[in-house]
Amino acid sequence: MALPLAFFAVFFAYPVASIVSRGLKDGGQWRFGRIGEVITDPHIGHVLWFTTWQAAASTALTLACGLPGAYVFARFDFPGKRLLRAVVTVPFVLPTVVAGSAFLALLGHGGLLDELWGVRLDTTVWAILLAHVFFNYAVVVRTVGGLWAQLDPRQEEAARVLGAGRLAAWWRVTLPALGPAVAAAGLMVFLFTFTSFGVVQILGGPRYATLEVEIYQQTAQLLDLPTAAVLTLVQFAAVGVLLAVHARTVRRREATLRLVDAARTARRPQGAGQWALLASVLVFITLLILLPLAVLVLRSFDGPDGYGLAFYRALASAGDNGGTFVVAPLETIGNSLAYGLAATAIAVVVGGLAAAALTRREGRLVRGFDALLMLPLGTSAVTVGFGFLIALDEPPLDLRTSWILVPLAQALVGVPFVVRTMLPVLRAVDARLREAAAVLGASPLRAWREVDLPLVGRALGVAAGFAFAVSLGEFGATVFIARPDSPTLPVAVARLLGRPGELNYGQAMALSTILMLVCAAALLVLERVRTDRTGEF
Amino acid sequence: MNTNLRRAVVAAAVAALGLPALAACGGSGDKGSAGAGGGKTVTLVSHDSFLVSDSVLKEFTKQTGYTVKVVKGGDAGQAVNQAILSKSHPQGDVFFGVDNTLLSRAFDNDLFTPYEAKGLDRVPKDVQADAARHRVTPVDSGDICVNYDRAYFADHKLAPPQSFDDLIKPEYKNLLVTENSATSSPGLAFQLATIAKYGEDNWQDYWKKLKANDVEVVNGWEQAYNERFSGSAGGKKAKGDKPLVVSYASSPPAEVVGVNPLPKESPTGVATGTCFRQIEFAGLLKGAKNTEGGKALIDFMLGKAFQEDMPLQMYVNPVNEDAKLPEVFTKYGAKIADSQTLAPEKIAKNRDQWVKAWSSIVLK
Amino acid sequence: MLRLDGVTVGFGGRAALDAVDLDVAEHEIVCVLGPSGSGKSTLLRVVAGLQRADAGQVYLAGKDQSGVPVHRRGVGLMFQDHQLFPQRDVGGNVAFGLRMRGVARAEAERKVAGLLDLVGLPGAQRRAVAALSGGEQQRVALARALAPEPRLLMLDEPLGQLDRTLRERLVVELRGLFGRLGTTVLAVTHDQGEAFALADRVVVMRDGRIAQAGSPLEVWQRPASEFVARFLGFDNVVEAKVRGERAETVWGGIPVPTGTPEGACRVLVRPAGVRFASEGLPCVVSGRTFRGDHVALTLRPEAGPELEAAAALQTAPGVGERMRVAFDAAEVVVLP
């Protein structure tokens, strides 16, 4: 408990408190009057309302689209399943500026919908909602699917034999058992969409603003720290309410689940209904996820002389062509992977310890800590980035120009994933197994390592995968933290897109394609490692 | 928190985390860290668009013995704000990238130590915004102008617009895409240009007419230029639907960089009567550890080697009159004679209120 | 009540059920007996509709069930490991099937209370299932399966996980209960004692096929094959050549019933049919197991496989003693 607590205190609470107090203090005096002014501003009220309802709608839509996907991935065996599971996670790591552009190929002017039915959804709320589904689909599929695959299918069969229809059995038996995972996924998606920035900016257009966009403008553009501080507090309050509600619902539902080996529960679909379900999920994934990704890949090959490798050659020959040299692509891939691995390691250690502590202890304080760990997801990247800047500026903590700052910031976002993914599974582990280990002479830590860890290896894999994906795609904190120049892939892509000219645009697409491949490859490796582990018992 | 208490808290936390090891290896990751107390390293703090050839930096090291370390953080506005927030413990010695729309904020926060750079005599007076006190040194200039898609106007047998007044004419209805002043720096510059042109009393009327002429607004330059503008490489692939876009005067030459063989003219052109002049400055940060190195770097940035490297790296114009523009710039770029400008103090004073007024006209 | 007609299920080229025909009459208790992997669980799953048959039909009350979904079949299934819903309490588990049928709340509560009384857990409605002992879980699972009054109740290893005394008591209780309620039951088990105690009729399965079906007595007395015999625990099986009323074996001559066809076959001698005699096959006692009311002996003859014999407590010889045995025609079964 000490390590996660200290991590959280130094790298989140302290920087954020620093920047907020800088905003609310004037000449050494607290100025709380500012709070009232900002909160009563009708514009802010409107922003808060929009932020909340779009997040709620996005979450509902993502769950509705993602649950069938989670089912298909958990219960069916089909060729290419592992690859597909890696691919649907790719949007999650793509910089919004790239993915947003690809998404426009679906919804925007001259997009698929426009060509087929003359419908344009860009600059509408629908674009925002659908893009949120696109980005967060994997959260539901992986978080819920991971647990689903381990639920004993005979539970549902027992309900069926007792007279429950397919849907009723799912609704009354499987869904409650999945409850913690669904709630965790829903919470993540809500927090991500509540603090949505790029999607709203790019696809929603200037008419839509979330609290996050507002905080960003006040901090990064206008340097109006008092207003930003109040908005940050408002966002905290909103996230706090949400976390409290979440904690209540989850606590009521948690129960010891019967978990079985995931490899045993999946089989080939049987009957027309199951094939139809599989087909419709695949069609959905193709349209909403693969198509935009394919557009990116296509554009990366669409060079000045027709389709070819011109942009990839340009990436490879960076340096000997003065004007086009922005970054050395190999170096950025290396940077991304190194940052990602460091962040994953930090997130898994900190999050794993936190989850273990939360499983073993009870009480209000512990639950409060559980909620606290989620706060980084509900905090603007610019707040954290600027907080780092003013808080971690003195020895022994002058980390501002150290590379470690980037993985630390990325791990802040990764830790909640690790905790949320591991907690339901850890709690579901039969306490008697731990007792058996204790009787055989294992210390609590040892018991955790020997009993829980092997049992939750799969969940740990899912968690690590997410932490890694998050850090690969992390853009906000990486950009807001001033650091010696070692750009990650998303940062390099954003830089290329910020420059005019065909070669830059093409290289941005090529580099995005490489980012996708790196991500998909990394996730594939992870999936493989994960199954090997679970095969051991 | 007072400093002692703060130290105590931090020290306790560090002890708990065993972070010294981490911090130590973090520092050693970069050659010659800033913590080493200056010495032979000079640290340049800038924004994400900053770019310079390695060979030019090597040249600087050869001349002065200093190695340059570059620290980047966010876009121009974020970088300035970060410099202001970390004023008590600056991240480096020289800051580059504060432009005339942000200059007053930097001055108000007393960010820079005055230094009169060598070579200023070769820089035109009109870009020397702080000629009396030399807190900042102009390094480059650029123009934000409306770009047009040559093919579109040729196909439609229509003359491209040349001035602000042209843009509100009915023949250019529904053709222009610009950026949100609140979120994009070219967007803001374009608005400032109209304020400079029509005056504080009349610019709003102009925008009402522009709005009536169906101007489209997006949040960022990337979306405007790469997605909606039909003339750019990205826009062609994304089936952009607007032949007019607010971008840079250097965008047309940038469109042909790397194209082989070079075309006769750039696919895009510049409406020369719609420009706003942006000047980027460098300054010596207060509290710099390596003041001498910083001064040398600022001098170097005004020198020919750096000035001639800039255009193809950052798509900006040199301010040193001796620096020669690369051929793509002279051949494919436009000469902007009468760019609009506004005094930095005036921008700083009215910026908020102007952006709010603009939003309520255009975005509602 | 239930009729299976040529039901076949394959798993990856291996037949779990191979053209199985089976009839279960109303109010009958049928036990399917077989080793693990013999396809007996698959049989239940096909009847329940949880597993599609690749060929053949399942009829319930004369109606073909192909295309009828699980929840409309009106059958009950008690799972091997109970599959109680961990997130519901005992009452919630038992009431589940009633709620699925839209039974009114008051009515359901009354019924749940009655069933819990019946299975010997009165007033356990609010208890958490995780806190129940194995036997109690068993009873709750039974109450849950009985609650919707299924026309056919299927039990998968109903008593598998319980200790011996509890199991023996429960078998008697269950048989009494099913008799009183008139429930039609199809159970599967690998325990012959359980099957014989519970069933009106026993079906022995092997590799997806029915090896033998009949009343417990018939099966016990006349195992239809060496497999059935051995599965029932009879290991005194030997190659034989029948000539007249005698079969020639390595153990010497064994009397067989009149009318046994001449030629090669196998012969089973039940342990009770191995008698100590002054004349006969010489053996050494190599093992001796106390079985409560008798002693089971393992005998090593001069030639051929070991023999099992049963002896009364007082007269049982000790290990290492030599003796001669003869065979009792009444306890000899000729196997095909």
Image (cartoon, rainbow, N blue to C red):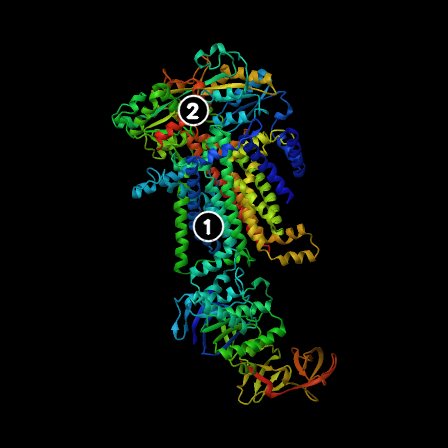
Q: Which residue is mark 2?
A: B351
In the rendering, at what x and y percent does residue A473 appear? 50, 38
The residue at the point 65 percent across, 36 percent down is B13
Q: Is residue B344 left or right of residue C130?
A: left
Residue B115 falls in image quadrant = top right
Q: Amino acid at mark 1?
A: Gly
On residue C74, the disc is none
Crowd class of label 1 (few under 14; some 14 to 19; many from 20; radius 10 Å): few
The spot of residue A310 in percent (x, y) is: 42, 32
Chain letter of the residue beneath label 1 in the structure image: A
Percent of width and height locating residue B265: 34, 22
Q: Nearer the viewer, residue B218 or A333?
A: B218
Q: Is residue A100 left or right of residue C160?
A: left
Number of labelled discs? 2
Marks 1, 2 in one chain: no
Residue C60 locus on image (x, y percent)? 41, 73
Front residue of A253/B37: it is: A253
Answer whether residue A249 is visible to the viewer in this image.
Answer: yes
**Residue that label 1 marks:** A80
Q: In which quarter of the view is residue C101 placed?
A: bottom left
